[in-house]
Amino acid sequence: MAATDGEYPATFSSIASVASEVAELAPQYDAVHIVFNKFESAIAYTPSLQTLISLDGEGENEPLMAYEFEPETKSEILQDLSEFMIASSLYCSVLEGAASEQSSRTQAMENASKNAGELVEALTLQYNKARQSRITTELIEIISGASALED
């Protein structure tokens, strides 16, 4: 399942609705993987993969085997915890992705501003050279015309 159409900015409630759909489908699959960009710094992010553990409450590898639940509604509690874990992990990955996107946009705008500044300087220099050349040509013509009249 891939969720590509979400509201922006993402809220925990919108992510929780996606998580409930994932939690319903999760028992059909071996694992739930989340792929996202992890924010590292203002200029770097890392593509990441997070695999979520299963809280189905079966087998020797049951994560909450040492705990007792009262009343005996362990399956409901595990289902709620599983859905909350998926929602929290999805929300965290969405926030990491948003931070990565914002830092990339900021870096792109800084680079564009720097390149525009360099282009303005180069064009200003080229304009000034052309203007100076035109003024020099006009001065030479005036001096040549004045010297021709004197002769």
Image (cartoon, rainbow, N blue to C red):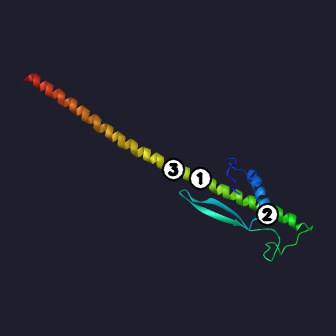
Mark 3 vs mark 2, CA separation in Å: 39 Å
SS category of the residue bearing label 2: helix
Give the residue at mark 3.
108
Mark 2 vs mark 1, CA separation in Å: 28 Å
Which mark is on residue 25? none
Q: Amino acid at mark 1?
A: Glu
Residue at the spot 74% in from the left edge and 50% down from the top edge: 14
For the residue pair 3 and 48, the one nearer the viewer reads as: 3
Q: Residue furthest right?
A: 71
Where does residue 30 sit, x and y in percent of width and height? 74, 68
Q: Earlier in the sequence, mark 2 or mark 1?
A: 2
SS category of the residue bearing label 3: helix
The quarter holding residue 73 reads bottom right
Does 35 sit left or right of 21 as displayed?
Answer: left
Q: Is 149 drawn above or below residue 30 in the view shown? A: above
Quadrant location, the C terminus: top left
**Neighbour class for label 3 at 10 Å: few (<14), some, many (≥20)?**
few
Whether label 2 touches label 1, CB < 8 Å = no
Does 70 sit left or right of 25 as displayed?
Answer: right
Mark 3 vs mark 1, CA separation in Å: 10 Å
Q: Earlier in the sequence, mark 3 or mark 2?
A: 2
Task: Name the mark nearer the viewer: 3 or 2.
Answer: 2
Where does residue 66 sit, x and y in percent of width and height? 83, 75
**Neighbour class for label 2 at 10 Å: few (<14), some, many (≥20)?**
many
The quarter holding residue 48 reads bottom right
Residue at the spot 14% in from the left edge and 25% down from the top edge: 145
Q: Amino acid at mark 3?
A: Ala
Q: Amino acid at mark 2?
A: Ser
Q: Earlier in the sequence, mark 3 or mark 1?
A: 1
Give the residue at mark 1.
101
Which mark is on residue 82? 2
